[in-house]
């Protein structure tokens, strides 16, 4: 099923919640793919299954049926523990509700994926602070999440998803709480991350201000992908905020 230029490949993926009268068919046979080196957007009305689909792709939820390959690995072949390890190493996830740990500072939250991978605490926090600075939060690295605005929390969540340089980054509404300039900076970082031959980014969004970054746009409705378009012309490469090389520097 998976071919080499596909970072993610879903075939007839189904997911239901509950049983009997309360059963909800959230995914009703999804065919979806995301190519390496691209920003793939996923759009659709509220409740159509976007968060469920990217949670299944990221290994946060188990699918009910169907085939799923991520970065060349068949997810159905992995046991629970191996799937957690695979996710930790290869996937960065930005939650719609941010899901920051309330007792940790902004920098400590961002450092979590590095600490989980065995990086020393000092190096992890230094790299976290450096990335937060790139996102305009250099003066708030020691703040607790409860003292940050929604947009600031969102940028911390984005930094956490990128800090360990995962090959697949999956973002649920990453610019919803951001003003135009912050949204552009975030999309610039994401674009810098994706446009590499062995990486990919999937973005769920309602934010038409950032559609010009998309290489492909998949439209979802009622648990299925109903349309995939590849926007005319190349996505914008100028004015992306941080350049690829400055992003590399942060991650060096
Ligand atoms: N844990 C759950 N238990 C039961 N039903 C759920 C659960 N998570 C999602 N659903 C249902 O599955 C369907 C798809 O939900 P999902 O969160 O994927 O939608 P969405 O497209 O992300 O919506 P939004 O744009 O509002 O975030 C909805 O009907 C929702 O109520
Ligand atoms: Mg959602």
Image (cartoon, rainbow, N blue to C red):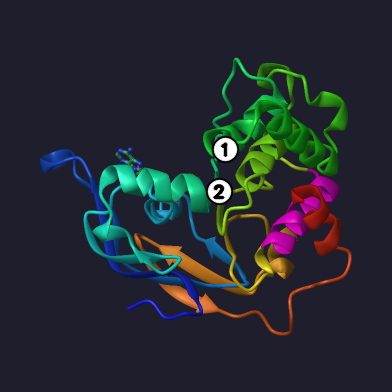
Residue 161 vs 104, above or below: the answer is below
Query: Where does ligand 1 appear, by image quarter?
Result: top left
161 or 33: nearer the viewer: 161
For numbered disc 1, what is the local secondary structure?
A: helix
Q: Is the magenta stretch mostly helix, strand or loop?
A: helix
Residue 35 vs 100, above or below: the answer is below
Residue 56 location (% of width, % of height): 37, 52
Q: Mark 1 points at which residue?
A: 113
Q: In this view, does 171 lie to the left or right of 74?
A: right
Rendering quarter of residue 97: top right
| Residue 64 is a magenta residue | no
| Residue 182 is a magenta residue | yes
Q: In this view, does 178 lie to the left or right of 40?
A: right
Residue 133 location (% of width, % of height): 84, 38
Start-end of magenta stretch: 179-193
Mark nearer the N terminus (1 vs 2): 2
Disc 1 and disc 2 in contact, CB within 8 angstroms: yes
Residue drawn at (80%, 63%) of the image = 244
Q: Is residue 24 visible?
A: yes
Q: Mark 2 points at which residue?
A: 92
Q: Which label sits on residue 235? A: none
186 or 130: nearer the viewer: 130
């Amino acid at each position: 099923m998976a071919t080499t230029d596909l970072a993610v490949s879903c075939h007839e993926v189904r997911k239901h919640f509950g049983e009997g009268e309360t059963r909800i068919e959230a995914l009703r046979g999804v065919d979806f793919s995301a190519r390496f080196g691209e920003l793939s957007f996923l759009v659709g009305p509220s409740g159509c299954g976007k968060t469920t689909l990217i949670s299944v792709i990221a290994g946060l939820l188990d699918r009910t049926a169907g085939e799923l390959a991520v970065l060349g690995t068949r997810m159905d072949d992995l046991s629970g523990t191996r799937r957690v390890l695979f996710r930790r190493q290869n996937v960065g996830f930005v939650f719609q509700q941010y899901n920051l740990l309330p007792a940790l500072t902004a920098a400590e939250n961002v450092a979590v994926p590095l600490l989980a991978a065995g990086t020393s605490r000092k190096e992890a926090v230094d790299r976290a602070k450096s990335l937060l600075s790139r996102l305009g939060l250099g003066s708030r690295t020691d703040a607790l999440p409860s003292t940050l605005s929604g947009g600031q929390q969102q940028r911390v969540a984005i930094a956490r998803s990128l800090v360990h340089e995962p090959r697949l980054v999956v973002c649920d509404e990453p610019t919803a709480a951001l003003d135009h300039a912050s949204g552009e900076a975030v999309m610039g970082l994401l674009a810098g991350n994706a446009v590499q031959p062995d990486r990919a980014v999937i973005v769920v969004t309602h934010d038409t201000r950032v559609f010009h970054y998309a290489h492909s746009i998949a439209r979802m409705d009622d648990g299925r992908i109903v349309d995939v378009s590849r926007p005319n012309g190349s996505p914008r490469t100028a004015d992306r905020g941080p350049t690829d090389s400055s992003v590399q520097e942060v991650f060096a």
